Amino acid sequence: MTAAELFDRLRGRLVVSCQAYPDDPLHGPHFMSAMARAAVLGGAAGVRINGLADVEAVRAAVAVPLIGLWKDGGGEVYITPTAEHAVAVAHAGADVVALDATGRPRPDGLGLAETFERVHRTGALVMADVATLEEGLAAVDHGADCVSTTLSGYTPDSSPQDDPDLDLVAALAGKCRVPVFAEGRIATPAQAARALESGAHAVVVGGAITRPADITRRFASALKERRP
């Protein structure tokens, strides 16, 4: 699948991020591959998957474009923090490798251009997870194939907020020559639709779809507040 074909398949569509933390009952490749299959059954055009074992399992379970990453370490940069992580994610079966492309130094000391080049040598594409317009533009200059607003609100250079950063989506879409993915705090179908209206190429939704404990907690909390 060429880059043009992959991005055409995702244009205007939903990507579901299927991830579960170690303390979640759904943690593990078996559950995440089932979650990915359910997402595709529901209409997802792609999936975003964390960890080598989960990427391998999901790659075997679904045929849609797979965005892979590897959250590791306790530092500021933990989304696919080194080139070694990125190459491993590609070899595990990811079509696109997502990694932290903020201005923060990466643990292996490599620049983004070198890291992106190592991913490209595997045949995979690069998704630059950024927090600001400047970071997105810089990532594109360094060779990113697409950018995502994943880290907006989670770095010192971006402002915390409760809602999706649609202003950043619009700014990136207006200035980037590569596809822009809206991700982060998208909790409702209406917000997802507004992300497309803001210029997103595609929309990534995670916890609002794939974290039953969190979804249940919201309902239980609403009832508790009104319990007689």
Image (cartoon, grey):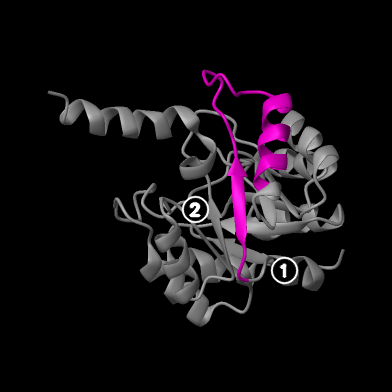
Q: How far separated are the C-alphas under marks 1 and 2?
A: 18 Å
Q: Magenta residues, as a range?
A: 12-39
Where residue 216 appears, x then y in whole percent?
Answer: 40, 30
The residue positioned farthest toward the left in the image shown = 228
- State the residue at coordinates (26%, 29%): 221
- State the residue at coordinates (24%, 30%): 223
- Left or right: 125, with 181 as reference point: right
Asked if residue 153 shows in the view, the reply is yes
Asked which secondary structure carries label 2, the reply is: loop
**Callout count:** 2
Q: Residues within 10 Å of mark 1 (few under 14, many from 20)?
A: some
Asked if residue 92 shows in the view, the reply is no
- Left or right: 223, with 101 as reference point: left
Where residue 46 appears, x then y in whole percent?
Answer: 69, 54
Q: Are marks 1 and 2 in contact (CB under 8 Å)?
A: no
Which of the labelled discs sits on residue 7, or is there none?
Answer: 1
Q: Is residue 201 above or below residue 183?
A: below
Q: Is residue 116 above or below residue 219?
A: below
Q: Residues within 10 Å of mark 2 (few under 14, many from 20)?
A: many
Q: Where, quadrant-wise, is the C terminus in this rendering?
A: top left
Identify the residue under disc 2.
Answer: 150
Compare residues 92 and 102 and report the one nearer the observer.
92
Which amino acid, mark 1?
Answer: Phe
Return the disc, 1 or 2, that comes first in the chain's sequence: 1
Tell me if residue 36 is in the magenta stretch: yes
Q: Is residue 139 above or below residue 65?
A: below
Q: Where, quadrant-wise, is the N terminus in this rendering?
A: bottom right
